[in-house]
Amino acid sequence: MNRVVISASGLFTAPHIISNEELVASYNAFVGQFNEANATSIAAGEVDALEESSVEFIEKASGITRRYVMDRAGVIDPQRMRPKFTPRTNEQLSLQAEMAVAAGGEALAAAGRAASDVDAVICAASNMQRPYPAMAIEIQRALGISQGYGFDMNVACSSATFALELAVNAVRCDTASTVLVVNPEICSAHLAWQDRDCHFIFGDVCTALVVERLETAISNKAWEVLGSKLATRFSNNIRNNAGFLSRCEDRDPTDRDQLFVQEGRRVFKEVCPMAAEHITGHLASLDLTPAQVRRFWLHQANLAMNQLIGRRLLGREATADEAPVILDEFANTASAGSIIAFHRHSADLAAGDLGVICSFGAGYSIGSLVVRKVS
Ligand code: CO8
């Protein structure tokens, strides 16, 4: 069995920023228009008036201050409130593939790897812009990778960590030598921007990681993967019912359940203990304890959630150095969150330092990797 490293990472940041102030101004304009248009029905008690959103609530409840998005104008237009993308022909690179090629190219360059070294591409994200042909195969071609295979996979917020486990096992068992994992998350396209409970939650981004054999890795920033652990437990608390059967069920595409829906409080209560126990159990299986871990790159959904998990792991508040936060800047970017934290906050650590990458989210699904800095 080969020893395996994550040898480099890459990040594509979506081109537009929406601050909480801008988001709330647009949402509140929408509320004003809705309440005015429905004044009679509201007065008759037939329709509930919508309540305004607030920057203070968003920052206190989530820790998010802004988000990057692929399209800004469509999202903050109170008449539209969803991104607007120009359709591309089948011959053009698709939007998610374009993001992945940018992040993937950066990761390969950082790893010192050429397209000819890569023999597998896994495109893992919460939403795919089409069912087939696989985005991963398109990315493979666009990056000039002429050998090996590519496939897409979706485990919602745990897509990246579940893909990493597959990549690590492929390299460990010699079915691939260098795997590129990419996570193009366009969460803005599946977010109900008209829903006050969740309109502030998500942002867009793409992360990429290169997984290869320790003994042949060139990068001096590699992290050896000591172990990976996946877990799932069914829950309806985060759900999206949009799918290829929607058309045949005569569903209205604007039905609320055709977008992201969650019971945020329940998710918070149920997932925090699961994630903390998962990480502690994973470390114990490697004869390690949370106190020995230099850094936790946790899923980035909610600041209070990560603080609670930190307390459960360490018996005290985790510092920003121990559990870095990126969701203030990026918001929740589904499976990419823990990988952005890793990308931004791993170069400063020393050889031998231990870290844990951990995602948690819809499914429920939890995925963790315990890693050690090589040099
Ligand atoms: N402005 C002002 N007030 C508000 C707003 C707002 N925008 N929204 C709600 N309120 C009010 C409510 O009406 C409520 O008022 P009252 O007390 O009078 O009833 C009060 O504020 C409190 O509301 P909540 O209980 O809903 O607020 P919370 O404190 O629970 O915070 C959060 C809400 C931030 C959603 C929080 O519960 C949370 O973050 N939970 C964890 C969620 C989580 O981790 N989810 C993971 C989902 S991501 C994932 O798995 C990937 C899925 C795939 C992604 C697909 C792309 C879209």
Image (cartoon, grey):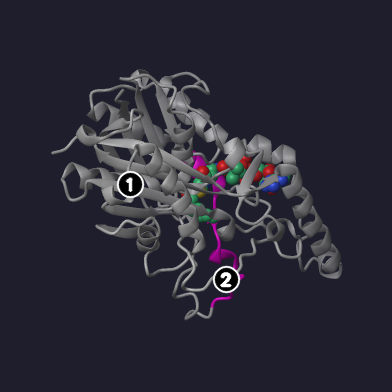
Image coordinates for residue 262, horizontal then vertical, percent: 54, 53
Q: Secondary structure at mark 2?
A: loop
Q: Secondary structure at mark 1?
A: loop
Image coordinates for residue 37, horizontal then vertical, percent: 84, 68
Amino acid bearing label 2: Pro
Write down the residue under mark 2: 87
Q: Is residue 147 above or below residue 91?
A: above
Residue drawn at point x = 81 percent, y = 56 percent = 29
The residue closer to the viewer here, 216 or 51, is 216
- Residue 80 among those drawn in magenta: no
Q: Is residue 266 at all visible to an observer of this figure?
A: no
- The quadrant of the picture occupied by the C terminus is top left
Q: Which residues are magenta?
A: 251-270
- The quadrant of the picture occupied by the N terminus is top left
Q: Residues within 10 Å of mark 1 (few under 14, many from 20)?
A: few
Image coordinates for residue 361, horizontal then vertical, percent: 45, 46
Write down the residue under mark 1: 114
Q: What's the mark number on residue 13?
A: none
Q: Is residue 193 at all visible to an observer of this figure?
A: yes
Residue drawn at point x = 54 percent, y = 66 percent = 258
Q: Does residue 119 appear left or right of residue 174 in this picture?
A: right
Q: Does residue 281 appear left or right of residue 158 in this picture?
A: left
Q: Residues within 10 Å of mark 2 (few under 14, many from 20)?
A: few
Q: Residue furthest left?
A: 1
| Cα distance in 3D space between marks 1 and 2 | 31 Å
